[in-house]
Image (cartoon, rainbow, N blue to C red):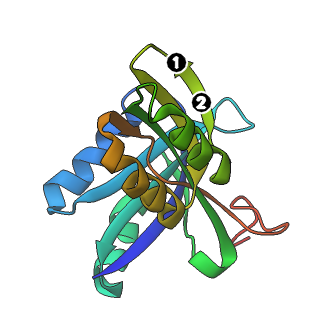
Amino acid sequence: MDRHVISVLVENHSGVLSRISGLFSRRGYNIDSLSVGETEDASISRMTIVVRGDSYILEQIKKQLNKLVDVIKIVSLAPEASVYRELVLVKVEAGEKTRASITGIVNIFRANIIDVSPSTLTVEITGDQSKLQAFIELMQPYGIKELVRTGLTALQRGDQQISQVGQ
């Protein structure tokens, strides 16, 4: 199954996220990733939704989303024409013997150590999924205590804007 990234502009008020996630649930579509936030206009939020399926499923999702009153615009974000990023926080075991090697890996990946305790380091890293997965795999031998991901967020490359698409 193909991975599809959909950017959806919606009215920014209560209940919109619930209605959209409910639509996916009722139709039996799984959401791999969902991130939501206010745009430059406080009355509009942007949702970045990652789903898996063929082109037929993608079209069905878009048609169902378009039926919702709160949805302003929907755009599929192709990987070659978009920038995808995700934030991951990783708490890793870091004793005296391993702290320097973990710090070296953190620096190579241009990540940031955001919290230090006597036995752990918490690292913040952003990037595309392959970079994040490589970092997580390198941290596993040290002992990952906790890990959290924000979910994918994306924008179209260049001067293309979702508000201009289809106008």
Which residue is nearer to you in this view: 137 or 161?
Answer: 137
Q: Is residue 69 visible?
A: no
Which residue is nearer to you in this view: 78 or 125?
Answer: 125
Q: For residue 15, which quarter of the picture?
A: top left
Which residue is nearer to you in this view: 127 or 42?
Answer: 127
Q: Amino acid at mark 2?
A: Ile
Relative horizontal placement of residue 139, taking residue 74 as reference (left or right): left
Seen at 32% across and 49% down, the residue is 141
Relative horizontal placement of residue 94, taking residue 78 as reference (left or right): left
Seen at 46% across and 44% down, the residue is 35
Q: Amino acid at mark 1?
A: Val
Q: Which residue is mark 1?
A: 116
Q: For residue 120, which quarter of the picture?
A: top left
Q: Are marks 1 and 2 in contact (CB under 8 Å)?
A: yes
Which residue is nearer to you in this view: 162 or 37?
Answer: 37
Residue 18 locus on image (x, y percent) = 30, 36
Does 31 sit above or below residue 46? Answer: below
Residue 82 locus on image (x, y percent) = 66, 70
Q: Secondary structure at mark 1?
A: strand
Q: Secondary structure at mark 2?
A: strand
Relative horizontal placement of residue 107, taking residue 29 as reference (left or right): right
Q: Is residue 88 visible?
A: yes
Label annotation for residue 80? none
Q: Which residue is mark 2?
A: 113
Does 72 sit above or below residue 87? Answer: below
Seen at 62% across and 53% down, the residue is 109
Give the quadrant of the C terminus. bottom right
